[in-house]
Amino acid sequence: MAGRIADGPRLTHAGDGVPGGGAVPAEGAGRPGTDAVDGASTEVAAIDVSFTEVEDGDVEAVVALWRDPYRDLADARLGETSTVLVGRATRDLPAVATDGAPGEPGPREVAAGELVATAMTGVDGHRGWLYYVAVDPRLQGRGAGRATVVAAEAWLAAQGARAVRLMVRATNDAVRGFYERLGYADQECVVLGRPLGAPDARDAGR
Ligand SMILES: CC(C)(COP(=O)(O)OP(=O)(O)OC[C@H]1O[C@@H](n2cnc3c(N)ncnc32)[C@H](O)[C@@H]1OP(=O)(O)O)[C@@H](O)C(=O)NCCC(=O)NCCS
């Protein structure tokens, strides 16, 4: 099922602590991209990235944001209760400045329509789950990650999910910090698992 993800009911706490909700950063928050460039804000507001369900032509751009993902993507698209959301820039956006070597060209700007964010999501009949939340490095730190999680939460809410869960390595402080900022809290559970069916190196350790 493809289509524009409309604003869903506000299940998320993603806007908490931010004056005006998720699209507007706290003044003086010191995040990259909040400075004006040529008079235009470089912040990625909710309106700057729009989310749809993934289509055939998106596959290469999606997997460029993921690691070993072709089968995961195919499985999520096949399922009736899962999907992959893709976010596209709704206007040309300057790239986040990086500390490249002197003389090297900086990252190219993001063109309107470019795929810049993904989330895999699905409901298991009880809860919603998030996987593969990823933002193009050129836009990280400017609100696109928050917009991605909000879009996935809206999709899950539309499916009837009343809670959302995700897994992050306990040692991944950067990603834990991101989710905690969005209102996610440690559920104090241990995740147990084993592969099903034929051995598959991809599933080892999951
Ligand atoms: C993790 C990721 C999705 C975050 O996206 P992003 O666009 O950089 O995040 P945002 O700019 O939307 O940040 C949203 C909020 O989280 C905060 N935040 C981000 N990282 C944080 C951290 N480590 N600690 C505390 N707060 C953090 C931001 O300051 C921002 O706060 P605000 O909106 O209240 O001002 C992105 O860095 C990414 O794609 N990383 C690589 C892939 C990855 O690791 N995905 C997670 C798989 S589990």
Image: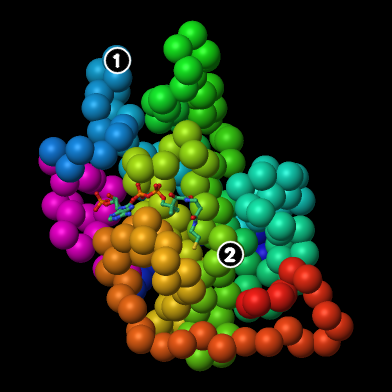
The residue at 66%/54% (across/down) is: 67
Residue 83 vertical position relative to residue 21 in the rendered view, above or below: below
Nearest the camera: 82 or 175?
A: 175
Q: Position of residue 9 (x, y in %)?
A: 35, 71
Residue 60 vertical position relative to residue 180 in the rendered view, above or below: above
Taking the image as drawn, is residue 129 in sight?
yes
Nearest the camera: 191 or 128?
A: 191
Q: Position of residue 130 (x, y in %)?
A: 51, 70
Question: Looking at the rendering, which quadrant does residue 2 occupy?
Answer: bottom right
The residue at 31%/60% (across/down) is: 177
Taking the image as drawn, is residue 77 in sight?
no
Q: Which residue is mark 1?
A: 38
Magenta region: 12-27
- Whether the magenta-drawn stretch holds residue 23 is answered as yes
Q: Amino acid at mark 2?
A: Met
Q: Helix or strand or loop: what does disc 1 sit on?
A: loop
The residue at 52%/14% (across/down) is: 105
- Counting residues from the start of the chain, the first of labels 2 and 1 encountered is 1
Horizontal relation, residue 26 to residue 126: left or right = left
Q: Which residue is mark 2?
A: 120
User: How far, Cα to Cα, is label 2 from label 1?
Assistant: 35 Å
- Whether the magenta-drawn stretch holds residue 24 is answered as yes
Counting labels gives 2
